[in-house]
Amino acid sequence: MHITLEADYAVRIVNCLTRCKTRMDAKSLASATGVTLRFSLKILRKLVAQGIVRSYKGTQGGYELAKPASEISLGEVIETVEGPITISRCVGAKDFHCTRVGTDECRFNKAYQEVAELVRQKLYGIKFGEQE
Amino acid sequence: MHITLEADYAVRIVNCLTRCKTRMDAKSLASATGVTLRFSLKILRKLVAQGIVRSYKGTQGGYELAKPASEISLGEVIETVEGPITISRCVGAKDFHCTRVGTDECRFNKAYQEVAELVRQKLYGIKFGEQE
DNA sequence: TTTAAATTATATTGAAATAGTATACTTTCG
DNA sequence: CGAAAGTATACTATTTCAATATAATTTAAA
């Protein structure tokens, strides 16, 4: 159970933009974060669409944060690139189908949802801005 | 970010064994849980190796829990089939490589580890036995 | 003691998700 | 204009996940 590499990359990119306060072009960002140029462009597009990063076209173009780093959380960045955090795909489905017992009302769905909520709260509580 | 289907299946299987207290053969277990026979055998092997389930060979063989259901947790079952819960693959690696800034000591590894620990504690706290 | 019902083990295949690339296009600024 | 940047879509490769196939071994009962 872990986040995708792409989400990791997105975190690196936002972290880099947080620290290097100047506008950066994709090429510099890519080499600074260790992500391939093409792939970082793909990620940057998602971050722009979500309103986390702002882009500038043209010769002096590049990327910078669209809002204060203190308002950007790990959770927001992660969910932007890989979608909502869920623990089990089974959540939302009816139930486990143990036909050998009478009632098989499943309490694990609830547990999974609680875990997902726990993770979400923790990740949304961690902001990029407030680094010591 | 979610557990694998295999882990879901493992939970179903252990849940089924918890509820149907009799010894069950793989075929019945498979059809009761909606997992294919072959795949459930593969999962059962892991559960047996971990000491969660006990197997009996021969004509009257089958599977049953190796210990009280109240001592088996969601976390144990999940980690048995898919390995340790981690949030980022980046954890343990050196750091993000933003070369444009001086020090880039990364606090996200720590955050990831905290989240993983949170999830682990929650999942290990949920036992199969104490279902109402 | 044979035999059928069960588990065990290894290897292989198929499918889906992830990761990364290619190409063509648009915008902006000097 | 024209070069340097971002934008968009589509495609390919790789990895991981899911499932299957085959063959061997063990056990209990007839």
Image (cartoon, coloured by chain):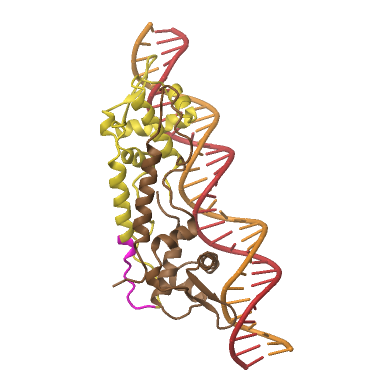
Chain colours: A yellow, B brown, C orange, D red
Relative to B100, say whether B112 is above or below: below
Relative to C26, say whether A9 is above or below: below
Comparing B13 with B69, the one in front is B69
Comparing B69 with A49, the one in front is B69
Residue A125 image position (x, y, % from top left)? 27, 41
Query: Does residue B80 appear to the left or right of A91 in the view shown?
Result: right
Relative to B124, say whether A79 is above or below: above
Residue B2 image position (x, y, % from top left)? 40, 52
Tell me which residue sits at (40%, 60%) in the image: B75
Q: Is residue A87 visible?
A: no
> Split into 4 quadrants, where in the image is the C terminus of chain A?
top left
Residue C30 image position (x, y, % from top left)? 38, 6
Query: Does residue B111 appear to the left or right of C14 in the view shown?
Result: left
Quadrant in the rendering for residue A128 = top left
Tell me which residue sits at (47%, 41%) in the image: B92
Residue A60 image position (x, y, % from top left)? 37, 14
Relative to B67, say whether C19 is above or below: above
Query: Does residue A42 appear to the left or right of D24 in the view shown?
Result: left
- How many numbered discs? 0
Magenta-drawn segment: A101-110
Is most of the magenta stretch helix, strand or loop? loop
Confirm whether the magenta stretch covers residue A7. Answer: no
Tell me which residue sits at (39%, 62%) in the image: B74
Q: Is residue A85 visible?
A: yes
